[in-house]
Amino acid sequence: MDDFSIKPGFPNMFGLTGGEVNAIEGNKRMLSSMTPTIIEKEGKLFMVLGTPGGSTIITSVFQTILNVIDYKMTMQEAVDSKKFHHQWLPDLIVIEKKTINNDIKDALIQMGHKFNERTSIGRMDCILVNEAGKLEGAADKRGDNIAIGY
């Protein structure tokens, strides 16, 4: 039930703050960030992505998509890449350990940013249709996931 707002204006265990529209009652909207994602390219299947992770789901999925499309990573490289997350409340940047170098982190702290380091963000499971038309599965080593085919 933590995907609903137990008390409007107060954060849940993920730091998400809900309102009356997220109350625990019928016809209300969960705070969940579930984002099972299917991407097409030129009308054909290109990528399928998903992850658990509460409020970090959307940023994990988005960063993985960017890694493949903009940074030309393989599906596994994109899944394995370090993740970071920021949401409005609480006002802090959640990063996986060794995501950014200390000079950049220190400069951001000097600007007033706050950080929370974690061992992992998300646990992506993805499929990419590569240029040869083959399915390229990727499982996140952050969990007990495995990519297998038939």
Image (tube, grey):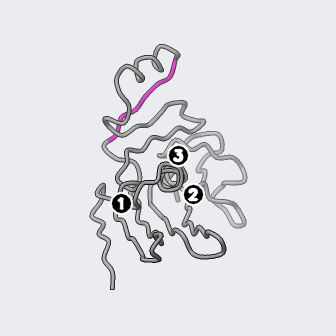
> Residue 12: which numbered mark, if any?
3
Q: Which amino acid does label 3 sit on?
A: Asn
Residue 12 position, x and y percent, is: 52, 46
* Image quadrant where residue 83 sits: top left
Per the rendered image, the range of residues in magenta is 112-118
Q: Do the residues labelled 3 and 1 touch (CB within 8 Å)?
A: no
Residue 138 picture location, percent across and down: 36, 65
Within 10 Å of disc 2 (Cα), the crowding (few <14, some 14-19, many 20+) is some
- As drawn, the residue found furthest toward the bottom would be 150
Marks 1/2: CA–CA distance: 26 Å
- For the C terminus, which image quadrant? bottom left
- Rounded to the nearest angstrom, the CA distance separating label 2 from label 3 is 11 Å
Q: Residues within 10 Å of mark 3 (few under 14, many from 20)?
A: some
Near-viewer residue (70 or 8):
70
Q: Which amino acid does label 2 sit on?
A: Ser
Q: Few, some or many C-alpha atoms within 10 Å of disc 1 (few <14, some 14-19, many ≥20)?
A: many
Position of 80 relative to 128 (above/below)? above
Q: Which mark is residue 136?
A: none
Instruction: Give yes or no for residue 116 being in the magenta stretch.
Output: yes
Residue assigned mark 1: 76
Residue beneath the point at 30% across and 55% down: 142
* Residue 82, x across and y down, in percent: 37, 44
Is residue 114 found left or right of 31 in the rendered image? Answer: left
Q: Disc 3 and disc 1: Cα gap in Å?
A: 32 Å
Mark closer to the observer (3, 1)? 1
**Which residue is nearer to you in this view: 30 or 117?**
117
**115 in relation to 64, above or below:** above
Image check: 134 left or right of 148? right
Is residue 81 within the magenta segment?
no
Q: Quadrant of residue 84?
A: top left
Q: Mark 2 points at which residue?
A: 32
